Image: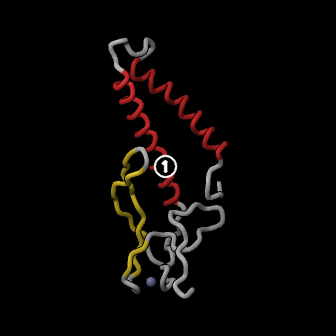
């Protein structure tokens, strides 16, 4: 998938897939018999909320990890163009629907004494980007 946005059809397809997983979650939560009448709606919402948070975490973790693995070994510094090694920092990312642990790639340019988040340049054709391309300073 090389486009920057996802089509409405693709999003609908993903939603329908997740709805099928919801049936699995419901079965795992209450078995074949389903929830008893003593279980209130708020409790059912808690289960759906936990499923949503887990789905968000799993989806974003996988996608961000795939993006990080497609980075060049030594991305170029956005200022001087010098190849810089990638290291990783762990932090918590807050996203729509929850939080997830993030193993974030960070580069440090020893010449410019600056940190930057790769990729500073356009990735190879067809590769996703972690952040939009930064404009040149001399425009
Ligand atoms: Zn530099």
Q: Residue at x 36, y 83 (%)?
A: 113
Q: Is 80 drawn above or below residue 17 in the view shown?
A: below
Is residue 87 or residue 78 the one in the foreground? 78
Q: Quadrant of the C terminus?
A: bottom right
Image color mode: secondary structure
Q: Position of residue 13 (x, y in %)?
A: 63, 38
In this rendering, is residue 30 above or below 128?
above
- Name which residue lies at 38% across and 49% down: 100
Position of 72 with respect to 117 (left or right) is: right
Number of dots carrying numbers: 1
The residue identified by callout 1 is 62
**Ligand 1 within 8 angstroms of badge 1 C-beta:** no
- Crowding around mark 1 (Cα neighbors within 10 Å: few <14, some 14 to 19, many 20+) is few
Residue 33 position within the rendered picture, expressed as x and y whole percent measured from the top left: 43, 11
Residue 44 locus on image (x, y percent)? 38, 24
Residue 117: horizontal and vertical position, in percent?
Answer: 44, 69
Furthest toward the front, the residue is 41
Residue at image coords 59%, 71%: 122
Q: Determine the secondary structure under disc 1.
A: helix
Quadrant of the rendered image holding ligand 1: bottom left
């Amino acid at each position: 998938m090389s486009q920057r946005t996802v089509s409405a059809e693709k999003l609908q397809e993903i939603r329908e897939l997740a709805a099928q997983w919801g049936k699995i979650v419901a079965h795992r939560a209450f078995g074949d018999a389903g929830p008893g009448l003593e279980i209130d709606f708020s409790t059912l919402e808690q289960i759906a909320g936990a499923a949503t948070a887990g789905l968000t975490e799993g989806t974003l973790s996988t996608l961000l990890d795939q993006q990080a693995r497609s980075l060049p070994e030594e991305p170029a510094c956005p200022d001087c163009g010098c190849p810089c090694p990638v290291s990783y920092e762990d932090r918590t990312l807050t996203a729509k629907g929850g939080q997830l642990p993030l193993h974030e790639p960070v580069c440090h340019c020893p010449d410019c004494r600056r940190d930057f988040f790769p990729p500073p340049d356009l990735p190879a054709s067809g590769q996703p980007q972690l952040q939009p391309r930064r404009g040149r300073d001399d425009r």
